[in-house]
Image (spheres, grey):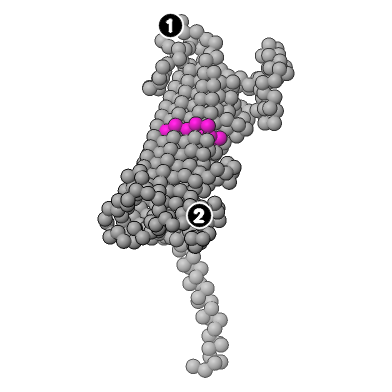
Amino acid sequence: MNLKRWLALLPALLLGVSSLLIARTTDRNTEEDKPPGFGSTADMSTAPRVDVDRPKPTFPLYQRDKRVHGLQPFQELVDAAPAGSTLRPPPGSYSGPVVMTKPLIIDGGGKVTIDAGDRGTVFSLETSDAVLRGLRLTGSGDSHDTDDSCLDVRGSRNRIENVVIDNCLFGIDLKQANDNILKGNKVSSKQRDLGIRGDGLRLWYSHRNLIEGNQIVDSRDSVAWYSNDNVYRGNVGMRSRYSIHFMFANNNLIEDNRFYDNSVGVYFMYTEGGILRNNLISHATGAAGMAVGLKEASNTVIEGNEIIYCAVGIGSDLSPFQPDSKIWVRNNRLAYNGIAVKLSSELGGNVFNDNIFEGNLTNVVQAGRGTSGLNQWQGNYWDDYQGFDRDGNGIGDTPFELYAYADRIWIEMPPARFFKNAPVMELLDFLERLAPFSSPEMTLKDEQPRFVKPTSIKSKVTG
């Protein structure tokens, strides 16, 4: 076929191709022909691991602290041990770093120290089905650029127990590490200012891990990013910034922990699901002090906790966030806090049942106006309830109603909170209650307040 004939047929060919494309596009607009969402049927449990770590630099011995000069490298013992065997090194101190790429059981019996001499990462666990027990890991570097840590975990189904971690920037760092057990470990950071310490425990895209009976003190944060279905049980966190900070981390369970003297106890940010149960959180003080925080979180359960001596007990911002979702707060004791509950949005959807409010400077703060009916309050004990219980059934005869008077000033103008307990504010509040010069705003109404403070609350009040 010559060139002239091809040129003559070109418009018809283009018209046919365009018609076909239009027809296919139209067909795909029907629900029946739409393909499933990208990745909707993917089994992520079998997805390969993606190497996202920054390159770890190599430091020669002369760049490491002199205390590790002359120590036997622990890497020699790891290299000599057959895969699947148990390594019980002689007691003493060894030099790091260590990279373990085969499953071993390493049992130091509490008498083995591995020291990296203040450079790099001390121990990299780059395998699955291994056990580290009874070791002391110390002396990492202090570079945030290379995430210098005492222990990197990059495998699954490992067990790390009774390991002491100190003088490290980051403590235990899990990335894409699933189904591991961290039990009975003690973690502390380098002596640095709070903001430039590393995280005591960090989970990144790590799921179904058990973190139990650990002690994390004097670090920056414990964080879980994009990490789902983990269990934090029986841990102690002290003198850090966040005891646990969840971000885009769903359905995690936090129970039976004790968190003291941290800026923030547990913070749920951009999460769905999650249970905070039977924890003690105290002395979260300072300008940003908060025992439990929620930021655009949904379907979270907060129950059975002791929240005491904190600047803010429970702080909720745009939570619950997803439509038709809830935040359930039940069976908690909120005592001797500056503000027991602070709701910073007008979305509603918070359900408060069977909680104890006592000794707080302010029980509840609700931002916005006309929002009192959006949240549910029932069966709570209020130490400032002024009603009676004539029939002796343990429930107040009249509802508990909380109004905002002069405190509306500092609620709507946060900088004025500095003067919250100043004599002038107390006087304004007294005059407002005595002879209101503006209509007070109802903050909440509890139809069935408890009249007698229970020693423990186990069941929901029913009307």
Which residue type carries mark 1?
Asp
The residues colored magenta run 257-265
Q: Quadrant of the C terminus?
A: top left
SS at circle 2: helix
Residue linked to disc 2: 66
Q: Quadrant of residue 360?
A: top right
Q: Single out the mark in the foreground, 2 or 1.
A: 2
Which residue type carries mark 2?
Lys
Q: Does the image show residue 111?
A: yes
Pick the residue in front: 277 or 388.
Answer: 277
Query: Label 2: few (<14), some or many (≥20) within 10 Å?
Result: few
Considering only vertical position in the picture, is 297 above or below 75?
above
Residue depicted at x 60% and y 34% = 288
Residue depicted at x 68% and y 27% = 418
What residue occupies the far left of the structure in this picture?
85
Pick the residue in front: 134 or 202.
Answer: 134
Residue linked to disc 1: 391
Q: CA distance from mark 2 to mark 1?
A: 78 Å
Q: Is residue 449 magenta?
A: no
Q: Quadrant of residue 36?
A: bottom left
- Comes first in the chain, label 2 or label 1: 2
Considering only vertical position in the picture, is 292 above or below 182?
above
SS at circle 1: loop
Horizontally, is 461 left or right of 60 in the view? left
Residue 410, image x, y percentages: 67, 27
Residue 211, image x, y percentages: 39, 41
Horizontally, is 123 left or right of 193 in the view? left
Residue 395, image x, y percentages: 45, 13
